[in-house]
Amino acid sequence: MESDKPIGVFDSGVGGLSVLRALRAELPKEQFVYFSDAGHAPYGERGDSFVAQRSMTIARQLLDEHRIKALVVACNTATAAAVHLLRQSHPEVPIVGVEPALKPAAALTRTRRVAVFATRGTLDSAKFRTLHDSLKQHAEFVLQPCDGLAAAIENGDEDEVASLCERYVRAVGEFGARDGCVDALVLGCTHYPFAIRHLQPLVGDGVHLVETGQPVARHTRRVLEERQLLQATEGRVQFKTTGCEKALAAAAERLLAA
Ligand code: DGL
């Protein structure tokens, strides 16, 4: 049966595990194939056509080899570069993308100043510009490209993660609840939730860190429900990568529990 098939989830590396964690909590009886393209990461500073070509190749592989029933693009950069192409090429497959959570942040902010951390690829994309333009009247968004941060998280280089977080938080300006300060920070790359332990102390406890895992998981459930594709077996995850299998297994064990 169609519903017995797995859901494909992909990212440039371990970032999508922040989405997979939410998907497993929301859909504990589903099977997932998690694909990390670590052999070609990071995507964020590579340019659209490279990311689009990788995304198309991975989708094809997940469909051919794993017969996935749905695809979650657990990467903001790949969603911006390729989700429209993926939907055009595979109209029969439900495809869920992720985008920086500007809308939830605009609803949360009291100071009406919101910072957005994301890759250069995401911030430069037409898709992001459209989203940003549609919300400009609700809040001022301070856009901060975070070169190198996804790669440092990918490599598990905690010193580099800490120093880049500090640099980018400082570049935004003052965080806090007072007028004129930024009181919400959008984590617009799926790697960044794994840097929360560095970011929260830097911005202060009162500042909202807004990620996309849970809303994406809820949306995926709705999409599957509508198409009667929900499964009720014992949930499990299979991991695939173009990088090092051992490193992915270790990262999954560490990060999925976090
Ligand atoms: N995790 C990805 C994102 O959400 C991309 C990180 C990268 O490879 O640069 O944008």
Image (tube, rainbow, N blue to C red):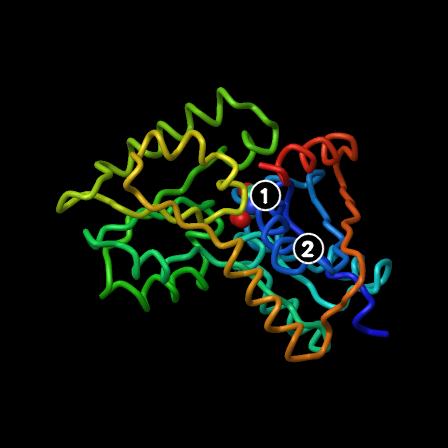
Location of the N terminus by quadrant is: bottom right
Toward the viewer: 253 or 156? Answer: 253
Which residue bears the numbered disc 2? 9
The residue lying at 66 percent from left, 53 percent from top is 24
| Residue 204, picture quadrant | top left
Is 209 situated left or right of 81 in this image? Answer: left
**Badge 2 density bin: few <14, some 14–19, many ≥20, Cα 10 Å:** many
Mark 2 and mark 1 in contact (Cβ < 8 Å)? no
Q: Is residue 44 above or below residue 160?
A: below
Residue 254 seen in the current view: yes
- Looking at the picture, which amino acid does disc 2 mark? Val
Which residue bears the numbered disc 1? 15
Is 73 situated left or right of 200 in this image? Answer: right
The residue lying at 24 percent from left, 64 percent from top is 138
The residue lying at 71 percent from left, 67 percent from top is 70
Toward the viewer: 203 or 164? Answer: 203
Whether label 1 lies within 8 Å of ligand 1 gets the answer: yes
Q: Considering only order in the chain, which callout, 2 or 1, is on the residue closer to the N terminus?
A: 2
- Looking at the picture, which amino acid does disc 1 mark? Gly
Mark 1 vs mark 2, CA separation in Å = 11 Å
Picture coordinates of residue 184, whole percent (x, y): 31, 48
Q: If the picture is divided into quarters, which one holds ligand 1?
A: top right
Residue 46 seen in the current view: no
Q: Is residue 222 above or below residue 178?
A: below
| Residue 23, picture quadrant | bottom right
Location of the C terminus by quadrant is: top right
Picture coordinates of residue 98, whole percent (x, y): 53, 59
